[in-house]
Amino acid sequence: MASSFALPSRRMNRRRIALVSAGILLLLALLAAVRLGLPSPLAPPDPLERQASRFAELALAFGQTDKKEVDAFFGPDTLRPNADRPTPSLDDLQRDLAALAADIAKDPGPASPHRTRLLSRVTHLQALIETIQKPRAVSFDDEARRVYGIDPVPVDMAAIAAARTELERLLPGPGRLADRVDAFRARYVIPEGKREALFDRALAECRRRTRAHWDLPATERLDVEWTAGVDAAWHRYSGGYRSQLQINPNAVAFLGSAIDVACHEGYPGHHAQFVMQDVAAGRGGLPVDERVILLRSPDSMFREGAANYGVDLAFPPADRLAFERDVLFPLAGFPPAEAAKFEKVRALIDRISPATAPILRDYRDGRLSAEAASAALQRDALVTSPEALLGFVDELGPYALGYTVARDWVAGRVARAAATPEGRGDRWAILRAYVAAPGMPPTRSAESKDQP
């Protein structure tokens, strides 16, 4: 009989030992959390973290409706949609987003910048889905505000007129200015066999100049694929500090496009932007909802503006002229002596580019036919492929404002921040802080009251 009671006794001892061990481990975990400033294992889950994860799930589910809508995601794979489940309907997504917005709004937790940004992300995604469900139900300007968080501003027509006057002086002759610009540009079309080498050289220089100011990871990499499968240039961040850039050779046919595309898509543009955000995410600097990059969003609008501003940051006028004259012109087989005039013409055309905004607005709102808008873009804004631009607006609405209005907004904000004692004139550092930080600045018009 004695032996029959020995086994249960040993089991009880094991249970006691296990309970004591678990208690010791939990105590050690609590002490470690206190020392390291981590959340207590006994603390209830943070509602904001749960809500942020829910937004990420819904945003990724929205990406199932159209693959282009999610530009990148560098969060946990557990939030990705189950491939075996059917794609949710837009109505279902709207219902779930409304529930999430109500959950965030009623949360009794303390107000925080992250909560405000998260609720804004939900609201913008709701507006985007509504725009898809009811195309052109709101005006061009309202869509810009509701979906992209940008406030269109009046175009400085006097500045555009002054640029046109100077361009007329540089390119005199009979006929329309647009025709003379096209003829001038045609003189600097890079031979097909030289486009890849010339672009690679421009990309290497953009990278060198950016790395002189930004501490990018040694393992970062941008893979370039030349293909006719895209209309122009298309960047996609792959994670792990790597990106893929697909380029149609025609997108860099004009010599001036080499620097523009290389900086905008690569360094300090989209690739470098995502790398800097990924670095921040790896250090716990980005909440999970901000690791989902939606194409049509205020964040993407800011990135477009920052990427275009980054071209001028990497290549101030004198530097750009010197690089084109001494490197790109010889590579392309063009006379270096023509580089100065070429750069003046290119810069003036860039100053005229904001003239596209009111034309695109009138087209989108139905005040201009496609034919009339195309003619106006070519005549007044010197756009060489107006039909392609109108097609872009048909697909993405006011997204095109990122290349002009958002660019000018970013330039103004960076300049104001650099002028402060804290900014110390370091525009590179300010731009880096903006593109890497959680909740990049909302891309609104650069009113004087909008402080950096």
Image (cartoon, rainbow, N blue to C red):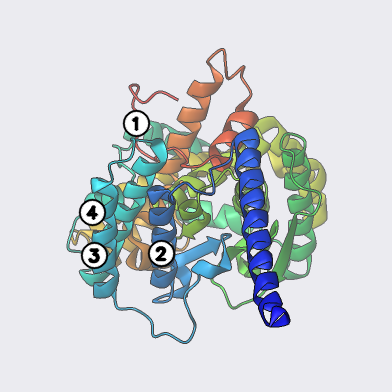
For the residue marked with disc 2, what is the amino acid?
Ala
Tell me the quarter of the image containing the C terminus.
top left
Q: Position of residue 215 (x, y in %)?
A: 74, 39
Which of the two discs, 3 and 4, sits closer to the camera?
4
Pointer 4: residues within 10 angstroms few (<14), some, or many (20+)?
Answer: few
Looking at the image, tell me whether mark 3 or mark 1 is earlier in sequence order.
3
User: Cβ–Cβ below 8 Å for labels 3 and 2?
Assistant: no
The mark tally for this picture is: 4
SS at mark 1 in the image: helix
Give the quadrant of residue 245.
bottom right
Residue identifier under label 2: 59
Tell me the quarter of the image containing the N terminus.
bottom right
Looking at the image, tell me whether mark 3 or mark 4 is earlier in sequence order.
4
State the CA–CA distance, disc 4 to disc 1.
47 Å
For the residue marked with disc 3, what is the amino acid?
Glu
Q: Position of residue 152 (x, y in %)?
A: 30, 42
Residue identifier under label 1: 158
Residue identifier under label 4: 102
Residue identifier under label 3: 130
Which disc is residue 289 wearing?
Answer: none
Report the side of 340 relative to 55 (left or right).
Answer: right
Looking at the image, tell me whether mark 3 or mark 2 is earlier in sequence order.
2
For the residue marked with disc 4, what is the amino acid?
Ala
Question: Which residue is at the front of the view, 190 or 39?
Answer: 39
Question: Which residue is at the front of the view, 452 or 84?
Answer: 84
User: Cβ–Cβ below 8 Å for labels 3 and 4?
Assistant: no
Looking at the image, tell me whether mark 4 or mark 2 is earlier in sequence order.
2
State the CA–CA distance, disc 2 to disc 1.
42 Å
Rendered position, 410 above or below 5: above
Pointer 1: residues within 10 angstroms few (<14), some, or many (20+)?
Answer: few
Rendered position, 61 above or below 212: below
Pointer 2: residues within 10 angstroms few (<14), some, or many (20+)?
Answer: many
